[in-house]
Amino acid sequence: MKKVVVTRPVPAAALDLLKERFDVSVLAEGEAERPGALAIALEEAHGALVLITESIGEAELEGAQNLELLANMAVGYNNIDVEAAAARGVLVTNTPDVLTETTADLTWALVLAVARRVVESDKFLRAGRFDRWGPLMLLGPDVHGKRLGIVGLGRIGEAVARRGRLGFGMSVSYWGRCRNERVESELNARRMELDELLETSDVVSIHVPLSDATHHLIGARELERMKTTAILINTARGPVLDEAALVAALEAEQIWGAGLDVFENEPEVHPGLMDRDDVVLLPHIGSGSLETRNRMARLAAENLVEVLEGREPLTPV
């Protein structure tokens, strides 16, 4: 019977599917983070269900002589050295599509929380400071009817844009490698160069994958180009945004505020962000609905079943 390693506990539906067919071992929460633990776990494995929190490179793959597949339970796969895996004949899969709508929902939760000062207002009330309604109390900018700028018009970026256009009557601009004439037609969206998008958007939402080309794509220069009333949202990957530059921009009141679900050195957060009321910080919960996490785990498990039983993967990288 082939052996499968799951690098931390995942929803039961995925584990049940795997246990019907394979010898499955599940590492305890945090065990994969111990030095050398992943390399040991992969030594006899034919397949592994891994999370975005686990880095897998040359050192982890060196002794994995039986390994056929790394099934990443995420859309992004920057945690895996894909070239090193390919050199050893190891396939890599991810979980696209299934988390698109849920992550777009969470993106909009951040937009509204920052604009309408939701977290700050909650703290204000709980601290006993709400003694009467006031016309100048906790004001923030409207979202409806404004301009939404999408940095990276992939699946999630498009879903965010669709909500902005159809739900909030926003005009939509986007920046990306390729033109999307369908979205331009359906949402009356405009493709712009990044500088123009930053200069004209009221909400800027980041949706690019992490790569050498997108590391610190949004830094001091880019933040200086944004409106002082603009909101920046990042639900993509932390290192796309230069957190130190963001702190400086917020301190200088160069932008209105920011909402972040991902961080540059996750799980660490830049200390300059922690006590600011103009930033909403979430612990990487973009795909964190019950339904979506179950679908992600199930798809990762299905990829393992397909490959280890001699068929093609469902969602290869």
Image (cartoon, grey):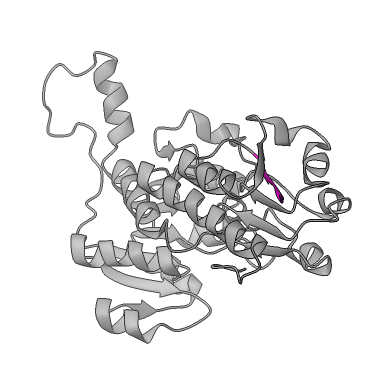
Instruction: Judge from the rendering whether residue 19 lies leftward or rightward of residue 5; answer left or right.
Output: left
Percent coordinates x, y for residue 303 in the rendering: 57, 60
Residue drawn at the location 35% of the way across and 58% of the way down: 101
Percent coordinates x, y for residue 37 in the rendering: 79, 36
Residue drawn at the location 31% of the way across and 23% of the way down: 123
Percent coordinates x, y for residue 221 in the rendering: 57, 61
Q: Can you name the residue that lies furthest to the top here?
A: 128
Looking at the picture, tell me which residue is in the foreground, 135 or 176. Answer: 176
Position above or below: 278 against 224: above
Q: Is residue 6 magenta?
A: yes
Looking at the picture, tell me which residue is in the foreground, 270 or 48. Answer: 48
Instruction: Judge from the rendering whether residue 86 lies leftward or rightward of residue 181; answer left or right.
Output: right
Percent coordinates x, y for residue 152 in the rendering: 48, 68
Q: Count how many numbered circles sit on residues in the image.
A: 0
Residue 211 visible within the image = no
Q: Is residue 219 magenta?
A: no
Residue 313 visible within the image = yes
Q: Which residues are magenta?
A: 1-7
Q: Quadrant of the C terminus?
A: bottom right
Instruction: Judge from the rendering whether residue 299 lies leftward or rightward of residue 307; answer left or right.
Output: left
Instruction: Judge from the rendering whether residue 229 lies leftward or rightward of residue 302; answer left or right.
Output: left
Position above or below: 101 against 268: below
Position above or below: 69 against 8: below
Residue drawn at the location 37% of the way across and 68% of the way down: 158
Residue drawn at the location 62% of the way across and 56% of the way down: 71
Q: Quadrant of residue 314?
A: bottom right
